[in-house]
Image: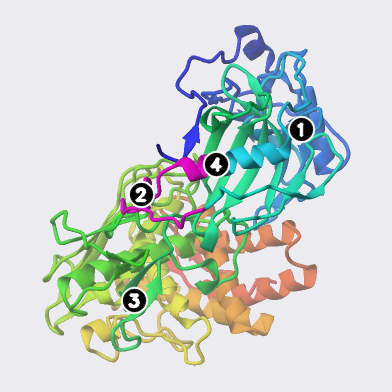
Amino acid sequence: MAREKDIREFAAERPTFSLPILEGAHEVSALTFNPLTGSPRAVFVKNPPRADGTLIQKALQYVTGAKSSLGFEATDQSEFTPDPHVQRTSNGQQSIVHLHQRYRGIPIFQMTRSVQFDADETVERVVGDSTQVRTELNIVPNLDPVSAVRIASQYLSNNPEGSETDHWGQPLELPPVDTRDFQPRIIARFDSPSQPTTIAHGPFAEDIPLELNFFDVGNALRLVWNLTLTLPQHSAQYVMLVAADKTLQADPPVNEYVLYCMNSLPTATSVRGSVFQHNPNLTPRAPIVFPRPATDYPLSAGILPSPFPPAWWVTKDQTLGNCTVAVSGYTQSSFYGTVNNGALVFEPPDEGGDDQKVLNIFYFCNFMHDFLYMLGFDEDAGNFQLTNFTAKGSAGDPVVARAHPGPVNGTANMSTPPDGQSPTMNMGLVANSGLHTAFDSDVVFHEYCHGLSNRLVGGRMTTRPLLQPQSAAMGEGWSDYFALTIQNRGKSIEKTVTGDWVTGRAGGIRSAPYDQNYPGKLGDLGSGPYTEVHNVGEIWCAALMQMNRELGTFLGDKDEGHELGWRLVVDGMKLAPSNPTFLDGRDAILKALQGLSDGGQLSNVQYKGLWLAAWSAFARFGMGAKARCTDSRFGGNTGDSSLPQ
């Protein structure tokens, strides 16, 4: 018998909104329903009522006054306890209050509502789950906490060892737990309706916390003990619900008492792969943990899902995951890892072979997925994921990354259809040098960022938002900008040349280094070498890299300049129109900077200094206050190096 168990019947027929309730909920514009409770999971508010007080007070006032829109009848008891910590988005423009549903002070398992506010502290929407309480419920348990722990421990002991499998389908050999002599002993107990209690750990790895909950099984709310049992060596940690509404029998059939049992820890100890982090010249092949923790990324973490990153890099035991599907050439052949002492290891025997190419492109794409997620390229923004765990955006579109054994048309490229359709990345051999683009972060990061700009500019469902010549050039510039600056954070010597290793040329693949002396300017578009999108894109990249330097100089820390620059560029893509000009891109970045100021993240002095720093960079490359672009073509542009008055 498998240990994991959940008696709820989600597929059963449940009543949803009755017509009178739906008609009375004037603020509801879109609904999805919980298949267990019938309540709406998302309520988008059209005409929010006025409310006073703190955000927590406003959230409580809303859910109390809008009971019908949340699936409650007028007589339902809808009691919510707020989380005292109010969450805010990275730009400070949205706030979230989390409310936990209770009945007479006892939590209702997994019933939480999140009330989301806009910058004006007006309710925008309410998401999450709640359930209807239409009858009086008994809050006095028939089963004491000691008996509940004894039943739960016996349930785990009665299950045969090795009956479960890990994340890759391998047998999960958990250490045995001998509970024959276990006599649960209370070491702490608190006087509140949920009766929080702590039991000494005995044969388990940690002391055992438990409290009363109500558990919605679909047709009733049952009183249960919610407890956590941690196996030795922290190999597993089970959240269990034991029926507290059943009277203890002399020899209780433990399977009837255990209503819910789920392992809350990952089933494998680790996943790692031996990869080149930049290219074989800069970084020898080394084992890296998959996925990389947020602290490994060259920026500070904002508000992210918890935990972050989830275990979404590897789905089973191949270079296949929620974010990237890496294969060899036009085949469906991915690279398999091997399980060793509970760890999945990807280590191709030939560090220059085709399997290593597949593994490296897999690593680079997953790295970029998580890095850009931290900057706001998430599910809602249209990123690349097979499953969208937030239920935002369109799922089903991980990057299909193809590492071709030989050359490929264009050497390296990436196509990006609208959200919900997978982009395709192709990495091939550079014939002149005999080196492969899948081993070079310059190239893979560049191509991945084409996906970023194509999804963000104009919105995730816009088709071809960078089709005009000047706009396409900006796409090339954005990609070079990220590929280089990601590698520059924390480095004393700035990398200003891209593609130098893979081509075997010190000057790389661009006409000049991206330093302060880069020669091109906006007024040069349409003449000389600046009639081709990659060459024109160099000017945009040079301006953005100069912006990072200027921001870092003002902040007194070049790494802070990189991080702020990345955030402004990503937010600027979101604020830019489809097929933008260079000046549209400039103005969008300045608007993003203003948003940080409006959100209270910058003081007035900071905002003015950073505003001047950004303007100075754009003016340096001909995008000053008096610059003009007729449209998004290369001709008809007037450069200017002046600053605004």
Disc with the residue nearer the chain's start (1 vs 4): 1
Position above or below: 58 against 418: above
Q: Amino acid at mark 4?
A: Gln
Disc with the residue nearer the chain's start (1 vs 3): 1
Q: Nearer the viewer, residue 513 or 408?
A: 408
Quarter that holds the C terminus: bottom right
Q: Residue at x 49, y 78 (%)?
A: 545
* CA separation in Å, label 3 and label 2: 39 Å
Closest to the camera, between mark 1 and mark 3, is 1
Q: Which residues are magenta?
A: 154-177
* CA separation in Å, label 1 and label 3: 55 Å
Q: Secondary structure at mark 2?
A: loop
Closest to the camera, between mark 1 and mark 4, is 4
Disc with the residue nearer the chain's start (4 vs 2): 4
Q: Amino acid at mark 2?
A: Thr
* CA separation in Å, label 2 and label 1: 35 Å
